[in-house]
């Protein structure tokens, strides 16, 4: 769920979820260590796999500004 948290962090900071494909987001994990996540690639993959996501996953991402097309 760390990828979702990094997407949410990006959305709260930028006001949108249009993430460049090569963007790397830094986030502090539960272990209090900073991690670098390839958020741009993850967002792109979520769009590609939209048909395989659960309705709950789609709802969470839509709530933070995911554009599916």
Image (cartoon, rainbow, N blue to C red):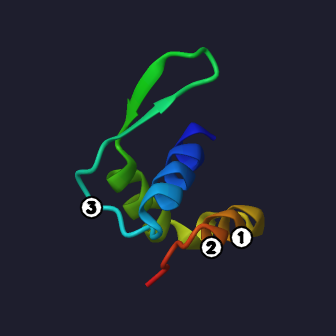
Circle 1/circle 3 CB separation < 8 Å: no
* Picture coordinates of residue 10, whole percent (x, y): 45, 54
Residue at horizontal 51 percent and vertical 45 percent from the top: 6
Left or right of residue 68, residue 39 in this image:
left
Per the image, label 1 sits on a secondary structure element best described as helix
Outermost residue to the bottom: 69
Residue at horizontal 34 percent and vertical 55 percent from the top: 40
Label 1: few (<14), some or many (≥20) within 10 Å?
Answer: few
* Picture coordinates of residue 63, whole percent (x, y): 66, 71
Q: Mark 1 points at which residue?
A: 59
Q: Mark 1 and mark 3: span between their CA atoms?
A: 22 Å
Q: Name the residue under label 3.
A: 20
Q: Name the residue under label 2.
A: 62
Outermost residue to the right: 56
Per the image, label 3 sits on a secondary structure element best described as loop
Instruction: Assign the C terminus to one quadrant of the image.
Output: bottom left
Residue at horizontal 75 percent and vertical 70 percent from the top: 55
């Amino acid at each position: 769920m760390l990828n979702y948290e990094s997407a949410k962090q990006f959305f709260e900071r930028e006001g949108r979820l249009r993430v460049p494909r090569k963007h790397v987001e830094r986030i502090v994990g539960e272990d209090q260590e900073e991690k670098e996540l390839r958020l741009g690639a993850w967002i792109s993959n979520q769009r590609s796999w939209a048909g395989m996501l659960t309705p709950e996953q789609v709802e969470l991402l839509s709530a933070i500004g995911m554009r599916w097309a």
